Amino acid sequence: NAGVMQNPRHLVRRRGQEARLRCSPMKGHSHVYWYRQLPEEGLKFMVYLQKENIIDESGMPKERFSAEFPKEGPSILRIQQVVRGDSAAYFCASSPPTVTDTQYFGPGTRLTVL
Amino acid sequence: KQEVTQIPAALSVPEGENLVLNCSFTDSAIYNLQWFRQDPGKGLTSLLLIQSSQREQTSGRLNASLDKSSGRSTLYIAASQPGDSATYLCAVRHRNFNKFYFGSGTKLNVKP
């Protein structure tokens, strides 16, 4: 059973471009979470999705950020018109529906905005 | 709102020492608490998961305790080794919100 997969692992964008980050959850996991880690800080929750539904997006910036988890395919975190402050590591985690279970984290995508 | 604090922010010890990392949280309504290890530029490795009904969990040289009523957890590392050098993150899963709240981590350096 492969772990949580994220791609790309490293992404470089210029200011104003779009960034698309992908996350494939573990097999059998229907819940996906996105977290952001700024340098020297802990992880901050961004959004929680189930298939075709956004359950909690309380950590998402109101503008330029969006997330989806379609019926087929990976979850996508999309950042439009990136700015230097978006440079961070973005981690995806997945879990089965049981809330007492842990979340399994992917290796992260490191976004650098030039 | 759940706040998670980790003390100390950084720790440097000689090899072989036993050490304790601390984590505190403000809201005791949690499902579980988890300790992770993060190596530079890498993802998170789960070390120990403690359910809210449990008091402690052990894995090898690691022991984690949980005192939910006081909002505290400790990670005890016995006989530390240079390979233990990493950042250790504590995260709590809130009972009403299906997400983890993370501390800022303790950066551990074990000197040979």
Image: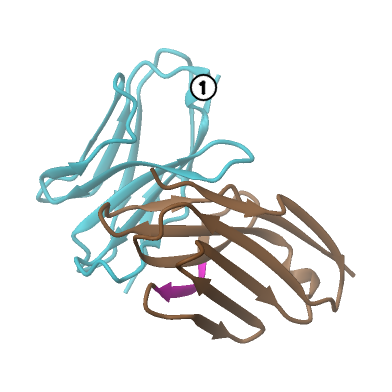
How is the rendered protein coloured? by chain
Left or right of residue B7: residue B94: left
In which quadrant of the rendered image does the N terminus of chain B lie? top left
Q: Position of residue B50 (x, y in %)?
A: 44, 75
**In the picture shown, does residue B50 fall above or below B4?**
below
Q: Disc 1 on helix, strand or loop?
A: helix
Residue at image position (48%, 80%) is B55
Q: Which residues are magenta?
A: B46-51
Residue at image position (47%, 54%) is A107
The hue used for chain A is cyan
Left or right of residue A24: residue A107: right
**In the picture shown, does residue A85 fall above or below A8?**
above
Residue at image position (25%, 54%) is B96
In the displayed orientation, state which residue is furthest to the front. B69
Residue at image position (30%, 30%) is A78
Q: What residue does disc 1 label? A: A85
The hue used for chain B is brown
Question: Which amino acid type is shown beneath numbered disc 1?
Answer: Gly
In which quadrant of the rendered image does the C terminus of chain B lie? bottom right
**In the picture shown, does residue A12 fall above or below B71?**
above
Q: Position of residue B65 (x, y in %)?
A: 55, 76
Magenta residue check for B48: yes
Left or right of residue B104: residue A57: left
Nearer the observer, A22 or A58: A58
Q: From the image, give the main secondary structure of the stretch colored magenta.
A: strand
**In the picture shown, does residue A45 fall above or below A3?**
above
Q: Position of residue A75 (x, y in %)?
A: 24, 46
Q: Where is residue A31, by image quadrant?
A: bottom left
Binning the other alpha carbons within 10 Å of mark 1 as few (below 14), some (14 to 19) or many (20 upward) gives: few
Nearer the observer, B20 or A114: B20
Q: Position of residue A56 (x, y in %)?
A: 22, 42
